[in-house]
Amino acid sequence: MTGRYKVLIVLIILLVGVIALLYYRVGNQQETCEQQKVYFNFNLEEALNFYESLNTSLGLLREYPGSHTIWLADDQALDYNALMLIYNITHNVSAKMLAEQILIAIKPYGGLYKYYNSVFEIFGIYPSTTTPQSGVDIIVGNIDNYTLNATIFNHTISNYYDYADLLAYRVLLWLHLGNYSGAEENFISLVKMWNGIGFNDSAYHNDTYQSYKLALFLIVWRALELNPHTCLLATKYVNMTREVSNIMSLLQSSQGGVWTSYKYVNGKIEYGYNISSMNGETTSLFVIAYALVSSNISIQITS
């Protein structure tokens, strides 16, 4: 064997080794991603007090204290899962009892996930189509002086990319389907809506930011970070994620619920009854985000 062939063989071996190493790194990106610490101040016991103020004679939770509206979707699923997370973290039996009450009370209406809502993707329940959908509110019925409503995601929407929440749901869907480039593309579009204070999407008006979109961002960011195919991208935005979490730390009221909206006035975040109210949906998303970024608790799916 001539020296030329020996050199060629060595080069081939080196090339194969480099390719193998690249494939190994791509397939094992989680080994190059150190899980980032993100935290926001949130009192789970006070949140539980807020949920108890939402209780009704039907066993379901109302939209906000004193309200005569009960949302079968998505509130009951969000509230149930949030309460179970509170129980798993604090071991407060009252949270578990209230969650189990919801689970029993919702059964006559088809269960927690009867009326499909894209937020259910957080719990691993995905739509039957990849066509972008938006929510439509319907009235299910009236009972004991309560109106039962549901938001159903069955309306095709072409400009989903104009809304932070719909982009977040797309990220979760693409992660589930293994379309990692699609997940990253939608996440970057979501990031571009962040202006340092809130998500300035097509729903932004009157200088008011929607709080629940902060929680959705944190949930989606954590999902990307925990996926070996997308964790490197998530790591690039950890500073932005901490900006989001810092604002979230301000938005829990003394009653335990989370203000649904806030403003930025004269260099400071403003919130309160002059701007918005508190409800179960926003509070639950904050609880879920808190559990996902602040502990090793996982979400258990219950049908």
Image (spheres, rainbow, N blue to C red):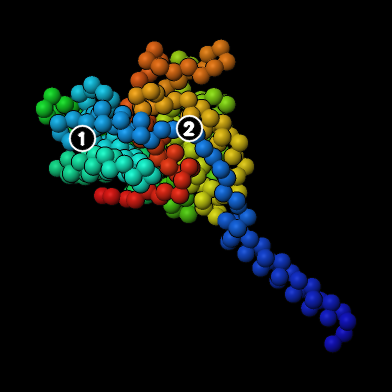
> Farthest residue toward the left?
144
What amino acid is labelled 1 in the image? Answer: Leu
Q: Position of residue 163 (x, y in %)?
A: 45, 31
Residue at far right of view: 3
Residue 262 visible in the current orientation: yes
Secondary structure under badge 2?
loop
In the displayed structure, would residue 273 be above or below residue 146?
above
The residue that mark 2 highlights is 41
Label 2 close to label 1 by CB (< 8 Å): no
- 295 in relation to 162, above or below: below
Picture quadrant of residue 192: top right
Give the number of marks: 2
Instruction: Identify the disc placed on residue 60.
Output: 1
List x then y, in percent, for residue 30.
57, 56
Crowd band around label 1 with a 10 angstrom C-alpha radius: few (<14), some (14–19), many (20+): many
Secondary element at image label 1: loop
- Residue 254 lies, with reference to residue 38, above or below; the image says above
Q: Could you say which disc has been placed on residue 15 in the image?
A: none
Residue 143 percent coordinates (x, y):
12, 29
Q: Quadrant of the N terminus?
A: bottom right
